[in-house]
Image (cartoon, coloured by chain):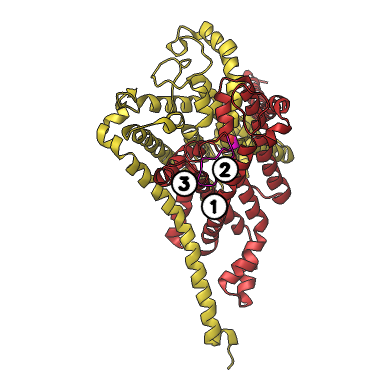
Chain colours: A yellow, B red
């Protein structure tokens, strides 16, 4: 009875096994650095923000005072600005993006769809400071001269559109953010729509539904988890978006009902004030704001990934 | 036709047209952005931009040679750290996955990828700038590599998974050990996709400015080394655009054009030439 030499020969066998064990350890170690880095982010934010956390406690989250001179720090105006601009952005980009995704997934011929999707992906690759540059020199004047005066004359009776038209403010930041989140909504929603089985569409069409009814009542409900995932993913991006928002939000830590007013966002205040922050409490307060932003995005991202995993069935591999 | 049917057909036509209009709006944004950059940037771009240092406000004719070099330095060092780490982590996810640990790493990698870049900047600041008591190119590179690692890991994993299992089984059946199979069969077979992922990751961090603001910071002169504050193109664009000088605005547009040319060229090359027909997800 002869068995293959390689298996029988203990030296060769040990060599192969040792190599495999070493390789396994090496790559596992590198995979573990991803966990380590994430833990490090949490730990460093927590530790560095300690002076501010000890001073203000939970009051930090609910105070609207931001005065570096008297060392009073409250996160509320920044949380407000971050949430208002992001929600505004989604109000614009969700219908636009979902519409475009429907066109790309359901209507456009395959070749057209893939070239348009390619362009959308290029749009997502544009650096955020470039969006800021363009917004500052093109969108802001446009808002100040045309859009905001028009909104005031047409809808000025609402508290949402009161006050002088500066061009910068919540509305401008929201609009710029909406265009920045658009490509994410389009491409992730498109993939969720493409994952809907063909039979679903055929059944609806066979029952006499129009193309739109099929899409709206059958395809979109079927893909809704993935679409919600794309919305959450974009929300997390919008919340953490720094450069473009910093350049157009007006940088004024106030809570105003008017969308035309200047505001501030968490990321913007960190970008603007961090290098100038002196003393111990001031930088710590900014890091604590970073911690708040981190928690917001982690929760929303975590939920988004789970939703996308549930629809595409391939895990978050493609998200 | 009944009124009801006319109504339904009308809604159908209107809504389908709208989806087309929305697509046009989305895609038009790209061309608007490019158009503006080429128009304003093209007028401002000259040879000085690539060869000279920035001048004081009010003096005409300065350039951003130091920022171009600084960007190359910071992004290059980030790649040196981030690409191998991300690649090996990706190999683990695709080839060695343990049940729970693999899923955990995958999920956490996605979360790490979703952390706002400014927060990553805070991490690098607290780890490097505080102990060194100095802004430095290294701190900027570390921040960027933290952003690069999860992207490269997930893309490497994805493209390795697209390598057919029969190739792996063939190699193993010939008696190759597992690591040999990975090094000589699986990785070469997936190399085009992996390289694409790496280029896209590098293009993405090359445009980042938020994590550099308080790590590499900025510098009006040549950087004094990797432990010194170093200028980079994205950070320069930010400061120049917000300044009050006409000539500095022109510089910002020129820098914007150069940056977007690099980023989009890398994207187009990677997606069209290298990974023809491979679908590339974004990080």
Q: Is residue B215 left or right of residue B175?
A: left
Choose mark 3 or mark 2, whichever is in front. 2
Instruction: Identify the residue at horizontal 46%, vertical 61% (top origin).
Output: A29
* Range covered by the magenta-colored residues: B221-233
Choose mark 1 or mark 3, whichever is in front. 1
Q: Which residue is mark 1?
A: B82
Magenta highlight on residue B227: yes
The reply to whether residue A186 is in sight is no
Tell me the number on the disc at residue B205.
Answer: 2
Residue B165 lies in what quarter of the image? Answer: bottom right
Magenta highlight on residue B224: yes
Q: Residue furthest bottom?
A: A1
Instruction: Find out whether the residues at labels 1 and 2 contact each other: C-beta distance under 8 Å.
Output: yes
Q: Chain of mark 2?
A: B
Q: Measured along the vertical axis of the image, is residue A148 above or below residue B121?
A: above
Which one is in front, A143 or A280?
A280
Q: Residues within 10 Å of mark 3 (few under 14, many from 20)?
A: many
């Amino acid at each position: 009875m002869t068995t293959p030499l390689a298996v029988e020969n203990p030296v060769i066998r040990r060599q192969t096994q040792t190599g495999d064990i070493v390789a396994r350890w090496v790559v596992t170690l590198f995979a573990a650095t991803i966990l380590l880095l994430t833990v490090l982010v949490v730990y460093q934010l927590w530790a560095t923000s300690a002076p501010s956390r000890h001073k203000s406690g939970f009051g930090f989250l609910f105070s609207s005072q931001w005065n570096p001179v008297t060392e009073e720090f409250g996160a509320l105006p920044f949380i407000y600005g971050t949430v208002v601009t992001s929600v505004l952005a989604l109000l614009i980009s969700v219908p636009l993006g979902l519409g475009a995704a429907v066109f790309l997934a359901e209507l456009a011929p395959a070749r057209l769809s893939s070239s348009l999707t390619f362009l959308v992906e290029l749009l997502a690759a544009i650096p955020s400071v470039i969006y800021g540059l363009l917004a500052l020199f093109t969108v802001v004047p446009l808002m100040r001269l045309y859009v905001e005066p028009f909104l005031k004359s047409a809808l000025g009776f609402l508290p949402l559109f009161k006050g002088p038209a500066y061009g910068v403010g919540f509305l401008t930041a929201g609009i710029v953010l909406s265009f920045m989140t658009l490509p994410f909504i389009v491409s992730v929603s498109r993939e969720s729509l493409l994952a809907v089985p063909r039979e679903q569409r055929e059944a609806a069409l066979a029952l006499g539904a129009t193309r739109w009814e099929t899409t709206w009542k059958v395809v979109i409900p079927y893909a809704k988890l993935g679409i919600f995932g794309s919305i959450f993913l974009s929300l997390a991006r919008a919340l953490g978006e720094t450069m473009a928002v910093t350049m157009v939000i007006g940088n004024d830590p106030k809570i105003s009902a008017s969308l035309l007013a200047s505001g501030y966002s968490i990321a913007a205040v960190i970008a603007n004030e961090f290098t100038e922050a002196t003393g111990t409490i001031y930088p710590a307060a900014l890091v604590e704001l970073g911690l708040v932003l981190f928690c917001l995005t982690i929760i929303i991202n975590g939920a988004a990934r789970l939703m996308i995993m549930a629809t595409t069935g391939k895990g978050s591999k493609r998200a | 036709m009944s009124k009801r049917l006319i109504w339904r057909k009308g809604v159908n036509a209107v809504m389908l047209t709208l989806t087309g209009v929305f697509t046009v709006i989305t895609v038009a944004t790209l061309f608007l952005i490019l158009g503006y950059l080429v128009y304003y940037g093209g007028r401002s771009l000259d040879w000085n931009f690539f060869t000279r240092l920035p001048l004081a406000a009010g003096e005409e004719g300065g350039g951003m040679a130091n920022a171009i070099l600084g960007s190359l330095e910071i992004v290059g060092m980030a790649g040196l750290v981030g690409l191998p780490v991300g690649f090996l982590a990706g190999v683990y996810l695709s080839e060695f996955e343990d049940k729970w640990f693999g899923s955990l790493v995958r999920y956490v990698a996605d979360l790490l990828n979703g952390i706002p870049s400014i927060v990553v900047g805070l991490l690098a600041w607290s780890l490097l700038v505080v102990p060194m008591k100095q802004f430095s190119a290294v701190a900027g590179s570390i921040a960027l590599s933290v952003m690069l690692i999860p992207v490269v890991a997930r893309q490497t994993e994805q493209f390795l998974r697209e390598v057919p299992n029969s190739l792996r089984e063939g190699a193993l059946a010939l008696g190759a050990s597992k690591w040999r199979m990975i090094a000589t069969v699986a990785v070469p077979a997936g190399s085009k996709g992996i390289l694409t992922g790496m280029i896209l990751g590098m293009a993405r961090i090359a445009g980042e400015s938020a994590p550099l603001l308080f790590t590499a910071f900025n510098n009006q002169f040549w950087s004094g080394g990797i432990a010194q504050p170093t200028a980079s193109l994205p950070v320069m664009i930010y400061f120049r655009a917000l300044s009050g000088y006409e000539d500095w605005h022109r510089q910002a547009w020129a820098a914007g054009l150069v940056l977007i040319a690099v980023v989009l060229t890398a994207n187009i090359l990677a997606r069209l030439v290298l990974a023809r027909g491979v679908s590339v997800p974004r990080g």
